[in-house]
Image (cartoon, rainbow, N blue to C red):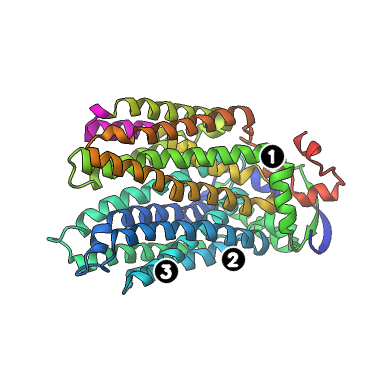
Amino acid sequence: MGAETGRITTDIPARLDRLPWAKWHWLVVIGLGTVWILDGLEVTIVGSMSTALADPKTGLGMSSYQVGLAGAVYVAGACLGALFFGQLTDRLGRKKLFLITLAVYTLATVLTAFSMNPTWYLGARFLTGAGIGGEYAAINSAIDELIPAKYRGRIDVAINGSFWVGAAGGALLTIPLLDPTLVDQSWGWRAAFGLGAILAVGILVVRRNVPESPRWLFIHGREDEAERIVTSIEKTVTDETGSRLEPVSDSITIRQRKTISIALIARTVFTLYPKRTVLCFSLFVGQAFLYNAFFFTYGDSLTTFLGVKQTGWYIAVFAVSNFAGALLLSRLFDTIGRVRMITFTYIFSGVVLGITGFFLGSVTAVTLTLIGSLIFFFASAGASAAYLTASEVFPMETRALCIAFFYAIGTAVGGITGPLLFGKLIDDASASGDITGIAPGYYLGAVLMVAGGVVAAFLGVKAEGQSLESIAQPLTAEDAEGADLSPAAAGA
């Protein structure tokens, strides 16, 4: 399990969870949570830049194959980056990695803006994806370990949903940048990537003030540093709220370790928590296919079948509904509860998508957008809760890698399998001129989403208001107490 450095009893988790909401917590939200806006901005801008990149006069003379390959390369980078940086986040700390991954993203985005040929562009897209993938693991674990248990669900869901703020911004940004009467097309697409890098630098400045996770510190033998950080947070929160903090009685005893072996992490995920593994897998695959079934075909449906020339406004409306759903429904994941809300959002959105598939032949651009907005008002909150689930139902020592693992699965399924399948449906439907040809994709996304909701109903974890340590006890704590680590004990 790694070199043992000592055994301590600490009340740090209880002290962090009993804090009232204060301005300091907004620093954490802004400094860490805004990465999803960058991801949404990236994905939407790239999806709208294919024409500009293909033109040898204004872009890089990329073929349709190369444009598609760039998307696959970005996805591959995100999957590998999540796994690579995820295990480093558990080994080296949250703060070190959330600074490194944002720096990787920023540098790669600048390189993208200065691309001189397709090979350069593809390499830059891979690095950009690696930075974003690493961000998901480092950021979700840090947020969960710094936000009080009472607010963890609503903050996680809202932050994950902020991807669509970036998507809406990216969609609106492409309208003037792709207008040759307003912007020189040889510079428009470069400016779009450059703006993403500028935003990332601003986030990096704020992020430097976010501390390391005290939970990570005391497990890795740095309890004195953890104590100083928590004491400082308590003083800041007290000064900001003017309220007196009540003493805590809950504590946890752990054996500190410098490192946790990959073998033990794998055993934890697949052997000690098999039901939670099935739960996370179902949630991530369901939301990945749902989004690809609709969103991947959405732009082509508007232009190819419904006569829309400029899709930016339609995509912006769709993106706003996604963020509104995550924001407005987020509180219910803490009040009504995780299991009920995840089950409802998954099943409802899946059923409505399936019904929509039967009426595709009679939709217009407006009605398709309105139906999509309704579906994803609920689906966005559910999909965001999938990331929340993966980040809180496994032990602290494995948290970042577990997030990375399931994120990689969802991203690979959504970004590789999805486009291959739904791209074929679009091609066939375009050849026949019949929009109903993409209906099988809707049906598949609906079935997988409903299946994810059913799995959540039976295997979901009631984590609302609970400390992370009570949801999944740290491996080091189980070791300290001589607990049984058998699968039977874990199931109990």
- Residue at the disc numbered 1: 274
Report helix, strand or loop for mark 1: helix
Report helix, strand or loop for mark 3: helix
- Residue 318 visible in the displayed image: yes
Q: Mark 2 Cα within 10 Å, few/some/many (few <14, many 20+)?
A: some
Question: Measured from the top left, where is residue 449 in percent x and y?
Answer: 48, 33
Query: Total of numbered circles in the picture?
Result: 3
Question: Measured from the top left, where is residue 30 in percent x and y?
Answer: 46, 54
Q: Residue at x 46, y 37 (%)?
A: 381
| Residue, far left | 181
Q: Which three-letter amino acid code belongs to the residue tagged 3? A: Gly
Highlighted range, magenta: 361-375
Viewer-closest of 484 and 199: 484
Left or right: 71, with 317 as reference point:
right
Q: Earlier in the sequence, mark 1 or mark 3?
A: 3
Question: Measured from the top left, where is residue 69 in percent x and y?
Answer: 38, 59
